[in-house]
C-alpha cells in the first residue's frame, strides 16, 4: 500500500472556514460595489428625468410661442390685405380725379 499523509480534521475545518470567510468577504465587497453602482445609476436616472422634464417644458414654451407667432402672422396678413385694398381704392380714386381734371383742362383748352 502507498504511504498516505494524515491531515488532522481540525486543520481541514479551519481551512474550509477560512475559505468560506474569504468567499464571504469577496461576496460582501462585490455586493457593496453593486450597491454603489446601483446608487450611481439611480442618480443618473433621476438626473435624466429632470433633464427630460426641463426639455419638455422648453418644448411646451416653444410650441406656445409658435402658436402665438402664427396667430400674429395671420393678423398681420389680414391687416396687409386690408391696407392693400385701401391703397388700391385710394389709387383708383386719385386716377379718377386726375382723369376728370384732364378732361376739364382739355375742354378749357378746346374752348379757347
Image (spheres, grey):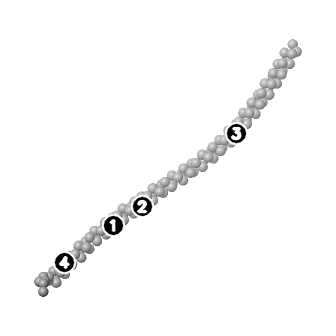
Dot 1 or dot 4: first in sequence order is 4
Alpha-carbon span between mark 1 and mark 2: 16 Å
Name the residue: 82% across, 19% down: 105
Q: Quadrant of residue 104?
A: top right
The residue carrying mark 1 is 34
Mark 3 is surrounded, within 10 Å at the Cα level, by few (under 14), some (14 to 19) or many (20 or more) other residues, namely few
Dot 3 or dot 2: first in sequence order is 2
The residue carrying mark 4 is 15
Residue 52 % position (x, y) = 47, 57
Alpha-carbon span between mark 4 and mark 3: 97 Å
Tell me the quadrant of the picture where the C terminus can be found.
Answer: top right
Q: Quadrant of residue 19?
A: bottom left
Alpha-carbon span between mark 3 and mark 2: 53 Å
Name the residue: 19% across, 81% down: 13
Which is more toward the observer, 33 or 7?
A: 7
Task: Give the secondary structure at mark 1.
Answer: helix
Q: Residue furthest right?
A: 111
Horizontally, residue 29 falls left or right of residue 70, namely: left
Which is more toward the observer, 24 or 6?
A: 6
Residue 91 % position (x, y) = 74, 30
Disc number for residue 45: 2
Alpha-carbon span between mark 2 and mark 4: 44 Å
Mark 2 is surrounded, within 10 Å at the Cα level, by few (under 14), some (14 to 19) or many (20 or more) other residues, namely few
Dot 4 or dot 3: first in sequence order is 4
Dot 2 or dot 4: first in sequence order is 4
- Do labels 3 and 2 touch, CB within 8 Å? no
Closer to viewer: mark 4 or mark 3 = 4
Task: Give the secondary structure at mark 4.
Answer: helix
Mark 1 is surrounded, within 10 Å at the Cα level, by few (under 14), some (14 to 19) or many (20 or more) other residues, namely few
Alpha-carbon span between mark 3 and mark 1: 69 Å
Alpha-carbon span between mark 1 and mark 4: 28 Å
Mark 4 is surrounded, within 10 Å at the Cα level, by few (under 14), some (14 to 19) or many (20 or more) other residues, namely few
Amino acid at each position: 500500500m502507498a504511504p498516505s499523509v494524515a491531515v488532522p480534521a481540525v486543520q481541514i475545518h479551519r481551512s474550509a472556514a477560512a475559505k468560506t470567510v474569504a468567499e464571504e468577504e469577496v461576496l460582501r465587497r462585490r455586493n457593496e460595489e453593486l450597491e454603489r453602482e446601483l446608487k450611481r445609476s439611480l442618480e443618473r436616472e433621476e438626473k435624466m428625468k429632470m433633464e427630460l422634464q426641463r426639455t419638455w417644458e422648453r418644448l411646451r414654451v416653444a410650441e406656445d410661442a409658435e402658436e402665438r407667432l402664427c396667430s400674429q402672422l395671420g393678423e398681420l396678413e389680414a391687416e396687409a390685405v386690408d391696407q392693400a385694398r385701401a391703397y388700391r381704392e385710394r389709387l383708383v380714386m386719385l386716377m379718377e380725379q386726375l382723369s376728370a381734371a384732364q378732361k376739364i383742362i382739355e375742354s378749357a383748352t378746346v374752348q379757347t
